[in-house]
Amino acid sequence: MNPSALVPGGLLAMGLFTEPVSVAHYLVVGAILFTAGVACMAVKRNALGVLMGIELVLNGANVNFVAFASPYLQADGGRGLGLDGQAIALFVILLAAAEAAVALAITLNFYNNHATVDVDRADDLKG
Amino acid sequence: MAEFLINTVGLSAWLAWTVTAVVAAVLVLNVIAGGALVFIWAERKIAGRIQDRLGPTRTGGRFGWLQSLADGIKLLAKEDLMPEGADGMLFRLAPYVSFCASFCAFIALPFAFDFIGCRLNVGVFFVVAVLGLEVFGVILAGYASASKWSLFGAMREAAQVVSYEVPLGMCVVVPVMLAGSMDMVTIAEKQAGWFTNWYLFHDPFTFVIFWVYVTCAVASVNRAPFDLAEAESELVAGFHTEYSGLRWSYFFMAEYGSMFLVSAMAAVLFMGGWNGPIPLATLLGLSEGTGDTANYFVRLLGMFNLLGKATLGVLVMMWVRWTLPRLRIDQVMTTCLKYCTPIAAAMFAGAMLWQLFLPGGLAPGLDRPAGEIREGWLEGPGGRAATAPAAEQKKVAQVNR
Amino acid sequence: MIAAAFDTGLVAAALPLAAINWHSTFFLLFAVLACVCAIAVVTADNVVRMALYLVLSLGATAGLFFLAGAEFVGAMQLMIYVGGTLVLLVFGVMLTAQAPFVSIKTAPGDRALAGIVGASLLAVLLLSAFSVEEWRKPAAGVVGDPTATPIGMALLGVRVDEPPAGSPAGVRSGYLLPFEIVSVHLLVVLVAAAYLARAKRRKTPRAIEVAASAEPPASVAEHAAIGREPAGRGGSVLVGGPR
């Protein structure tokens, strides 16, 4: 195996292991989580799948907030959010939990009335 | 230890931290595994004695010392079965999820002043949070076993664990409030000295809270009399019915690990942690020291102290298991929601008022100034300047305007 | 001696750069786990597996929070999100189960459309993530403050933390009002969810009981349904009364 051909990719990978991470790295993770959540909400027919998508979306946003709030990720002490970012993330977690509880109660009621959790069957008000 | 490796042995920083982490992990793993071995033997002996029989007496001499070893060998040699309709990946994953949750909580548990995996600022919170993750292994095991009884047992156990987290959280907040920090090292340090400094004897509300904590902890680890979900006469074996051999032993180690953990937490939060009933080290004139001149003997003594208290807690749990009859699931839920939660809330309010008016505890003359609470973040005579480590001295000028 | 040999010889041959930054390595581990599990949530069909992947993803996110120095938020994530919300979700999965766990699939056209929209959204987000130069400069050798007590104090309205270096000076508000609002909000949600999900006495049998009467009960929900109505399917008419 010719090592020189792998050097650029190897150096990039090595960089990820050896260089300190910055806010951009966290933003990438947040973006992927957010997009996965949106795709989950769009694709899933199971109501609980949609709920899981909502949780992913909120988590992606939280990752962004915490990244901006972190003193470890920004050079020169940064112009970051500091404690405010962590407080925002805290409130997002609390509200997401509350919203998940209500959504599950609604889903349970829907299941009791229609014997299914398929959201495509929720068309009583259609037309 | 990492500093020792960097400075004395001359390893590079990243390697030193790796070695330290691996050593710490191996030590904790041995505590869990070795502890499980000892507790299995202890459980069988105690069960035997309470039931007026002898327990194991043949393997390894008169007291059956090697019974646990024999059990271990038997478990390793068993056939690895999986039920036919079982979800393969989830079935295999479930024991590890449970064990990982139990093991991870030991990261934040202090065994002595500097013998801790990671000194987290939110240590207590982290341990309680991670203990709540064990329920996922249970649910996965119950679902993946493709058996109705496993699923029922798993759901009941999950409901029980999750319900008891509420009063457990309230019980745990009281020592945090008394110490002013969620850092378990700080909480234990504040109880240094004679046993009268223990938070157990701080005020009557904390005393009651301790017993509520014991109840909630026993329920949280699904231990009798709250072991409806895994009792033989109820649901075969609940969520781990279909597990045998090494997979079952993972659940087993997770359960005994959790038992040890909640006992150790009770010791740290209420009974002084590694500070004994008698301050032996101070009486002998030794001090703990810091950094390179750390007095390892004192710390070792403290560690054995904590291990002894935790083992005492586990033995009491075993004693209770073989003495009290089992509760029904509705009685379990009633105890949680109608008894433990209101009592914990009322005692929390009481402890809070006591802390406001009598911060010194039962003996108002004790020297416990109110300013030391909240880690000295507020300006004041006992403020940040007095307690700040070197890295944060620069903030003193701004805080003390 | 041994250390030097280990350090320079073997290790340097394996890695072109001699030092592993453990912070970055663990970040990579948690980030890959979170992203892979998030994508697995989208692609999995079995709803219980989706729940498992979501648990792993959120747990890895909590690890990311710890690495960023937000220890309190990380512990909150573990306790509330993973230990609370997801357990609730799994309970919901079990209660709405149909025998066997039916996989409800979407049409391929819908999936393709969602894929295109998702990919474009991801492209936009990644572009914005890499476009601001300031966000790509990592910090070096920072010692952060522990954040649990400042957060607690802030929730009571007192800001004791030091503002970040470049932020504008001025009075910073505490979080007392949002704290109280969220507390009342949680109480309202608790009551509402308990009310919405209560077991009702019914004049006519529920849809799932009608479905259950057609086939032998084989799932948790049907067992639970039959168990929950003590009078049984036929008796609910006798019980009568307003719901």
Image (cartoon, coloured by chain):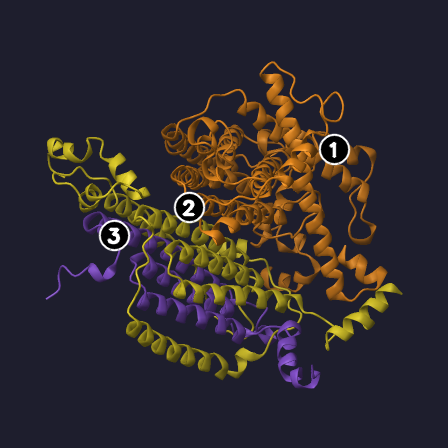
Chain colours: A purple, B orange, C yellow
Residue B370 on image: x %, y %: 57, 43
Dot 3: what SS?
helix
Q: On the picture, is C19 further left or further right than A119?
A: right
Q: Write down the residue under mark 2.
A: B143
User: Can the viewer see residue C1 in this picture?
Assistant: yes
The residue sitting at the top extreme is B52
Amino acid at the residue labelled 2 = Tyr
Near mark 1 (Cα within 10 A), the count class, few <14, some 14-19 or many ≥20, is some
Q: Residue at x 24, y 53 (%)?
A: A116
> From mark 3 to mark 2, how far is it between C-alphas?
24 Å
Q: Which tag is nearer the camera, tag 1 or tag 3?
A: 3
Amino acid at the residue labelled 3 = Ile
Residue B97 on image: x %, y %: 53, 49
Dot 1: what SS?
loop
Near mark 2 (Cα within 10 A), the count class, few <14, some 14-19 or many ≥20, is many
Front position in the image: B291 or B196: B291
